Image (cartoon, helix red, strand yellow):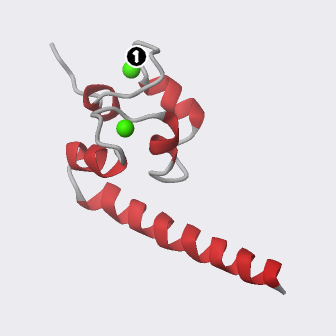
Amino acid sequence: MKRLVAVLMALALVVVFGVGAANAAEAKPCPDTFKALDKNGDGKLALDEFKAGGEKNTEDAFKAKDANKDGALTVEEFCGAEKK
Ligand SMILES: [Ca+2]
Ligand SMILES: [Ca+2]
C-alpha cells in the first residue's frame, strides 16, 4: 500500500514539473528559461539541471549544446547565441 502511494506521488510530481517546464520553455525567452533551469544559480546548467527542463532535454542534446565540452552549459551554449 505504501508503495502505491509512493508511485502515485512520483507520477504527480512528474506531471506537475513536466507541464510547468514545458510551459516555461514556450512562454519565456531563452535566457529566462536558462535562469529557471539553473537551480543553483551558478550561471551554468549541469546535466541534471538541463534534463529537468523537459523530455527533449536528453543527455545527447546536452552534449550537442556543450560546445567546449566542459560538462556545463553557459547561457550562450544553451540558447545557441550566434556571434558573428
Ligand atoms: Ca547550475
Ligand atoms: Ca560548456
- Please identify the quadrant where the N terminus is shown: bottom right
Q: Can you give x and y, in whole percent of width and height, for residue 82 in the image?
A: 21, 22
Residue type at mark 1?
Answer: Ala
Identify the residue at horizontal 40%, vertical 60% (top origin).
21
Q: Secondary structure at mark 1?
A: loop
Q: Where on the picture, by quarter, is residue 50?
A: top left
Residue at image position (40%, 12%) is: 68
Q: Is residue 20 above or below residue 31?
A: below
Closest to the observer, 27 or 2? 2
Residue 46 lies in quadrant: top left
In the picture provided, is 68 more to the left or to the right than 62? left
Q: Ligand 2 closer than 8 Å to the CB at disc 1? A: yes
Q: Residue at x 49, y 24 (%)?
A: 64
Residue 80 percent location from the top left of the image: 29, 29
Taking depth in this image into account, of 33 and 72 the one nearest to the observer is 72
Q: Describe residue 67's horizontal placement relative to residue 34 as left or right.
A: right
Front residue (pair 6, 31): 6
Q: Which residue is under mark 1?
A: 67
